[in-house]
Amino acid sequence: MEGDQRAYDRGTSIFSPDGRLYQVEYAREAVERGSASVGVETAEGVVLAARRRVRSPLMDPESVEKLHQVDGHLGVASAGNAADARQLVEFARQTAQRDRLTYDEPMGVEPLAKEIADHVQEYTQSGGARPFGTALLVGGVADGRPALYETDPSGTPSAWKAAAVGRESAVIREFLEAEYRSDADLDASVDLALDALAAPDDASFSPADVAVATVTAESGYRRLPTDERRNALDSLGLLDESGSPQAS
Amino acid sequence: MEGDQRAYDRGTSIFSPDGRLYQVEYAREAVERGSASVGVETAEGVVLAARRRVRSPLMDPESVEKLHQVDGHLGVASAGNAADARQLVEFARQTAQRDRLTYDEPMGVEPLAKEIADHVQEYTQSGGARPFGTALLVGGVADGRPALYETDPSGTPSAWKAAAVGRESAVIREFLEAEYRSDADLDASVDLALDALAAPDDASFSPADVAVATVTAESGYRRLPTDERRNALDSLGLLDESGSPQAS
Amino acid sequence: MEGDQRAYDRGTSIFSPDGRLYQVEYAREAVERGSASVGVETAEGVVLAARRRVRSPLMDPESVEKLHQVDGHLGVASAGNAADARQLVEFARQTAQRDRLTYDEPMGVEPLAKEIADHVQEYTQSGGARPFGTALLVGGVADGRPALYETDPSGTPSAWKAAAVGRESAVIREFLEAEYRSDADLDASVDLALDALAAPDDASFSPADVAVATVTAESGYRRLPTDERRNALDSLGLLDESGSPQAS
Amino acid sequence: MEGDQRAYDRGTSIFSPDGRLYQVEYAREAVERGSASVGVETAEGVVLAARRRVRSPLMDPESVEKLHQVDGHLGVASAGNAADARQLVEFARQTAQRDRLTYDEPMGVEPLAKEIADHVQEYTQSGGARPFGTALLVGGVADGRPALYETDPSGTPSAWKAAAVGRESAVIREFLEAEYRSDADLDASVDLALDALAAPDDASFSPADVAVATVTAESGYRRLPTDERRNALDSLGLLDESGSPQAS
Amino acid sequence: MEGDQRAYDRGTSIFSPDGRLYQVEYAREAVERGSASVGVETAEGVVLAARRRVRSPLMDPESVEKLHQVDGHLGVASAGNAADARQLVEFARQTAQRDRLTYDEPMGVEPLAKEIADHVQEYTQSGGARPFGTALLVGGVADGRPALYETDPSGTPSAWKAAAVGRESAVIREFLEAEYRSDADLDASVDLALDALAAPDDASFSPADVAVATVTAESGYRRLPTDERRNALDSLGLLDESGSPQAS
Amino acid sequence: MEGDQRAYDRGTSIFSPDGRLYQVEYAREAVERGSASVGVETAEGVVLAARRRVRSPLMDPESVEKLHQVDGHLGVASAGNAADARQLVEFARQTAQRDRLTYDEPMGVEPLAKEIADHVQEYTQSGGARPFGTALLVGGVADGRPALYETDPSGTPSAWKAAAVGRESAVIREFLEAEYRSDADLDASVDLALDALAAPDDASFSPADVAVATVTAESGYRRLPTDERRNALDSLGLLDESGSPQAS
Amino acid sequence: MEGDQRAYDRGTSIFSPDGRLYQVEYAREAVERGSASVGVETAEGVVLAARRRVRSPLMDPESVEKLHQVDGHLGVASAGNAADARQLVEFARQTAQRDRLTYDEPMGVEPLAKEIADHVQEYTQSGGARPFGTALLVGGVADGRPALYETDPSGTPSAWKAAAVGRESAVIREFLEAEYRSDADLDASVDLALDALAAPDDASFSPADVAVATVTAESGYRRLPTDERRNALDSLGLLDESGSPQAS
């Protein structure tokens, strides 16, 4: 790191001479430190999947929150600072609920992602707080159409066919770019998501090591139970049964 | 950079000994870091156009927001920090809506640009926040007359026949100064805008790499769909079909 | 410690270049400085236990607050800054009471742990305050099901079959991982908790040196009196009668 | 610059050991950086004139705001930070409007200048903001009597027969002191103002390069259109037709 | 002191890398700088006693406030910053009064000590203030049962049979540990308290040099008048009549 | 300047080790930088006089505000930061007006001076602002008795028979001490004031260079017009007619 | 001064490692810089006396405020920062008035001194302000009993038979300790006060150099006029008639 950088990286209310916001860039590093999450959009719906770092066999892997239901038709996968992600998810839930009350219909994925992003931006401009050290993949189905958005620590939203956030997200994204098929069905998309999560280090997973959810027009937000995750991992040759067996 | 500069560039509430506001100048650098946007005013209306940096073929280029509809007759093209631009556009939308409610007619382009600029100025004088790292081109048609304004990070508004903000804006401006014809029709102005965007690096574009919108008295704010953008690029010899094909 | 670390560790509203929040990490050190607490979940209920550092035979060991009743069916074991823990317990009590008033039924363990965690997170993002230097084990029985959660200084909640916080918690956790049996009854779980507390230094305890509470569907939150603690320690070969005899 | 100065020039809420307010002095430098404005008081009314820096032939010179109408009988010429000037002009407009509502007659020039100055002073005493980097010439006619005031970044008002602010204001002031005639008529005063603006560098101007307004009891605030400015420049031998022709 | 300590000891809103709060530790030093106070709990009630530093024979020793009545049945002995102690006592009085109004019975010693402690904690977590540089011994009789609590600058409450705060409190505590008898009567407990205060330096006292109060169920809070203090000191061989004679 | 001084002179909310408030002392330097004002109390009333620094013959010397009418019977002469003085005079006017409304009689000189001083003190104790860099001489007649007060930047009021503030005030005060006669009439007191202003540098003045006002029971606050000032200067041998002739 | 001290003496919200509050200690230095005040309590009432530093024979010594009437039966003598003292006296007056309205009887000396002290303490704990650089002697007669209290910059009240604050207060206190007689009458107490003020430097005084007031049950607060002060000084051999003669 150069001496110059140091002079401008202690607060959100300051630009560097070349127009960068270092605290936002450092918050991106916080995202990179977190285990990865991926999202895949298909015609049927959206798949959200995440690696979980389970620190102990005594820990309930389900409590390592990487996937979050926001509304019946909306879900979020997160990477980075877990506590920050919880705050944003809480914000998302209240936003979706308020929107539903106002308009009497389910909130769209795009408007939700943009409201989250605008909320995140405010923490990058005013002093007295730090940016959110988390990135979200917001997926859902509204008006029958699936959509997948990313929000990053700068507060910029973007739409994706398939996206990754967190550790080695660049590698995972490359994998997704190579393997994504827009005509894949939901099961194949779950497989793609799991394969992508394993891509950076040729990992194998116990069912507890991953979380998977789908959002479809028919079933709404639905977490895949352990046996479905085990079956999927097994059929993909990614199953490692040596891990924590008590995951529900 | 001199040692002196360092002593005065950490906050918005401080002048340098020669009367400069370094944080505002650094915010201009943030604008220069962003991909360029241009605006062209003609007798028929205003053309807004922008280069988009699409990081991945899986990303929806339409979600890289460079052009923003503010009201039926008002649009904004932005450059610089995308999240900051979103905040200003939101401010612009609320301002235009409130103005319309108060006066029962569409808000003028000049008053809108000035209200945005005054809002931006406040972030350059008080401590506890940073300036907006974004510049806007505000274009529209009110009372049948087209108008094009720029607002910069200092909060200064200015009116232009044709303007550019963002990366290599000086080069693009030179191009516009050479090529601008006040009697050009709307289509020619779209062509001028696209040519100008390509000028700094003799770039060629896929339709996804650019966004174009027109604002006219007849049609209001209107985004050019992919095929119109492709046709325009093609006829200008700027078309590069190797890029992301799924843009809507 | 590196010079770099120093540059980013003075406040909660700042990330380090590698995306870390040093003040949160230092708050974890405050937890590690405190005497240990453990929690064990069984089918019958939850056991909470803690070592107490009694500074003088004239001090009432019961006033060294490591275990706290939150509601009839909810308890908390803490480690770290005792005064900080008291504030969080007070927050927990008010939250549980408010929840009970709103929904007319006992609050669940998971929702309570998550509300505490979200409260803790806020002290890690805004300037002007420090994080809480305490970790909590939140245990209880709701709807007949026992549950055990940990909240840490970052504001992240996690669920455990058996958990430890405070001094040498890594050693205690290893012990628990080796010895935990999910089919153990409540008495065996009390024994496991006491053995775990003694594990790091092969300690022996007077009854005053430890606090134990159980939360079951039948009896709710119940502190084990001195004689029960003495009997348990004695049968485990952990009793040291040389210590302070006047504990109630 | 001495080392001592550095120790006291970072904020408005601090005096230097010799009783100076460096931030106010630096704000004066911001005024000196801006293109010059002049004001001339005659028996018939007040002339306000300014040089405009038009960065491009595509820019509308009228949007380079140096002259501002405040009320029907009141105008302001500014120099320095243009965005700061806009804020003060907005303050002036609201003040004049409120005064008119309260007293049911046009606000006097002196009271307006003093209210502006008092507003400016507040930004020189409290922390958390910087001074205004702009100086205003406030001119108008009230009760049939013309008056011309200057407000500077310290918040001190002063009355002048003829005044200059902005770049090379000392040279322009010397010119005015030599050439000012109190019995000159309005046209001669316009000529004096234009000559004064040209004095520092023997400049010649296109009509777009200057803005001129008069305030008289008969006609109130009146901007001179392009042809009148061209004629005046021409008759003074100051016309340079090579510049931007499209100014309205 | 190490260089490291310096980096983390300037504010309450910051942890050191090893999880310490230096400002709280420094506040403990402020307590150690103050003359000592002791408290002794017996079956009959609680004895509070304190050394007083009377700077001049013209000073009224009674105005050196070390013992404070909080309610009819509640008293406080303090050590450290006298003005800080007054603020906490005022807080205690209001708290006890409000509690009495709410529940229509005298406030308990433990709840009062805990409310004081929670109030003290808040000054250790938020920026913009320093911790209280005082420790209190809160003694009283509620529901017929005597109780004695200490609150320290961290905001941690603790219950004691006999306790000491202030200068040489460690030596006094050792003395109390050796000499405390739980079956002593009130007079013997007064003697123990006076002996303990004299222990660190084999001091002898004039009656003005010490303050003594008892809290019993029968008599409530009662300050011992000069003659009783003289008699007690005399019978203990601690009387020094050379000092200030005019104490009331 | 010593290194020590530097450590304690950057804010109003800090004492130096020897109990000094450097920012207040620096504010006194700001007063010393301003041109001098004097006040003289006689049996008939109070004389206020001031030197004016007129920067240009085009400047209206009357607008260099050194003397200010506060109420019909109250005036103020100021020295130091002119904009700060304006704020205090505005405060004085509102105070006198409010007092008159409350008590239905003219406000006394002493109460007004003390309210100003208390207002000034507040800027010397709280952070976030600087002291007022101005000293006032408050003179007037209430209940038929003349009175003259000084308020300084520390917020201390004092009463004088004759006083001076501003540049070379020590020399002027010496002159006044030597020449003041308590039985002088009003005209002689005007002469004394003008002689005193000229004392430091044996100056001669044009009428525009000085301002003079008297406050008497009969005539209230009255500014001396140009001819009276010229006559007085002439008779004192202080007249310099070479200066700015247009003063009203 | 040690380097260590420097690290902890810039604000009120920080303890030094040895538990000291340097800003409070520096405020005590501000008190020591001020001319001395003394108070003497007798059976008849309280005497307050002060040295006045009259900077010029033109200054009204009565306006050098060292003695202040607070209520009909209450007075204050101050030393240190005069403007700070005025603020505290204003606080005292409002407190005494409010107390009288609430309880319909004159406020006691002790409660008033304690309310002042608590007010002073708040400026020693919170950031953003400095302590009061003044010490007060609060004297009065309530319920027929005289009382004399001191409040210091830490906010600690204390009661005295005779007390001194300000320059050389230690020497004056020694004098008072040697000479104070509790059975002295009021006149002898005035003499004692004047002798004490002269003690440090064997000073002699003009009547203008000292202020004296008595507070008795019969006469309430009463300032001694010039002739009484002259007679007292003369009979004590302390009279110096060379000084300012015009004191009222």
Image (cartoon, coloured by chain):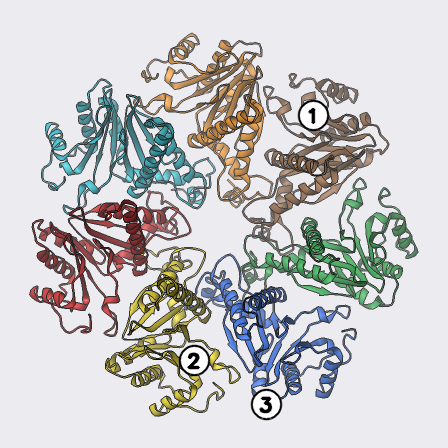
Chain colours: A green, B blue, C brown, D yellow, E orange, F red, G cyan
Q: How would you rate the neighbour count of disc 1 (Cα within 10 Å): few for under 14, some for 14-19, many for 20 or more?
A: many
Q: Nearer the viewer, mark 2 or mark 1?
A: 2
> Both on one chain, marks 2 and 3?
no
Marks 3 and 1, Cα distance to the nearest angstrom? 89 Å
Q: Tell me the quarter of the picture where residue D221 sits.
A: bottom left
Chain for disc number 3: B
Disc 3 residue type? Asp
Q: Secondary structure at mark 2?
A: loop
Q: Nearer the viewer, residue E121 or C55?
A: E121
Asked if D132 appears above or below B239 in the picture, the reply is above
Q: Which residue is mark 2?
A: D52
Marks 2 and 1, Cα distance to the nearest angstrom? 81 Å
Asked if B48 appears above or below E49 in the picture, the reply is below
Q: Which residue is mark 3?
A: B183
Q: Residue at x 32, y 36 (%)?
A: G93
Q: Which residue is mark 1?
A: C210
Name the spot of residue E36 as percent of width and height, x first: 46, 23
Q: How would you rate the neighbour count of disc 3 (Cα within 10 Å): few for under 14, some for 14-19, many for 20 or more?
A: few
| Residue extending farthest front | D104
Q: Nearer the viewer, residue C5 or G167?
A: G167
Q: Nearer the viewer, mark 3 or mark 1?
A: 3
Q: Secondary structure at mark 3?
A: loop
Q: How would you rate the neighbour count of disc 2 (Cα within 10 Å): few for under 14, some for 14-19, many for 20 or more?
A: many
Q: Tell me the quarter of the picture where residue G67 sits.
A: top left
Disc 1 residue type? Val
Marks 2 and 3, Cα distance to the nearest angstrom? 26 Å
Q: Nearer the viewer, mark 2 or mark 3?
A: 3
- Side (left or right) of A192 relative to D78: right
Q: Which mark is residue D139?
A: none
